[in-house]
Image (spheres, helix red, strand yellow):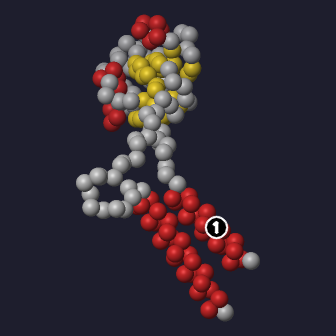
Amino acid sequence: MARVALLVAAAFLAFLMAAPVTEVAAKRWTVGDNQFWNPNINYTVWAQDKHFYLDDWLYFVYERNQFNVIEVNETNYLSCNSNNPIANWTRGAGRDLVHLNETRHYYLISGNGGGCYGGMKLAVLVEKPPPPPPPASPNKNSASTVSAFAHQFFVPVAVFATVWTMLDAVPRLW
């Protein structure tokens, strides 16, 4: 009975390893990279070559007693007005995360210490993740007749064979 349960578990493990992974992992962006969330940094330039996708995170690192992270609408972003925030992402430690959980524009500023007027403002557009790339098709000029997906099953078959060999050896040990 235990042998059947172990065999089922091994088959399930082999299936999980053979299943292709198509999800794009969420990314945590450190705002400003190694310059962090500070005045006199152009965050528009920092963000211009980046793609922000649904479920990514923005990580703000800053001096907690001087600055903060406030989400505002576009009008208040342009005028550096933090009086009517959509959200206050500040948690008090100067290490704040903003979860980009909707596909829309996010307008973030520092409302403390004149930070926004010093350039501490970031606008990002969150998009849906791109679809996974299509599977590679086999090269028609190739002499090989092996499927383009054969590599996906090599490891699971090897794992299954190893588990089977171990299972087969168990009765001999008794």
Name the residue located 43 percent from the left edge and 34 percent from the top edge: 130
Q: Position of residue 42 (x, y in %)?
A: 31, 21
Name the residue located 74 percent from the left edge and 77 percent from the top edge: 1
Q: Residues within 10 Å of mark 1 (few under 14, many from 20)?
A: few
Indicate whether 54 appears above or below 146. above
Can the viewer see residue 61? no
Q: Where is residue 132 in the image (x, y as percent from the top left)?
A: 44, 40
Q: Which of 10 and 32 is in front in this view?
A: 10
User: In the figure, is residue 7 to the left or right of 106?
Assistant: right
Residue of label 1? 9
Q: Nearer the viewer, residue 112 or 5?
A: 5
Q: In which quarter of the image is residue 145?
A: bottom left
Count up the numbered dots. 1
Q: Nearer the viewer, residue 158 or 118?
A: 158
Name the residue located 47 percent from the left edge and 71 percent from the top edge: 158
Amino acid residing under circle 1: Ala
Indicate whether 52 appears above or below 144. above
* Quarter of the image with the C terminus in it: bottom right
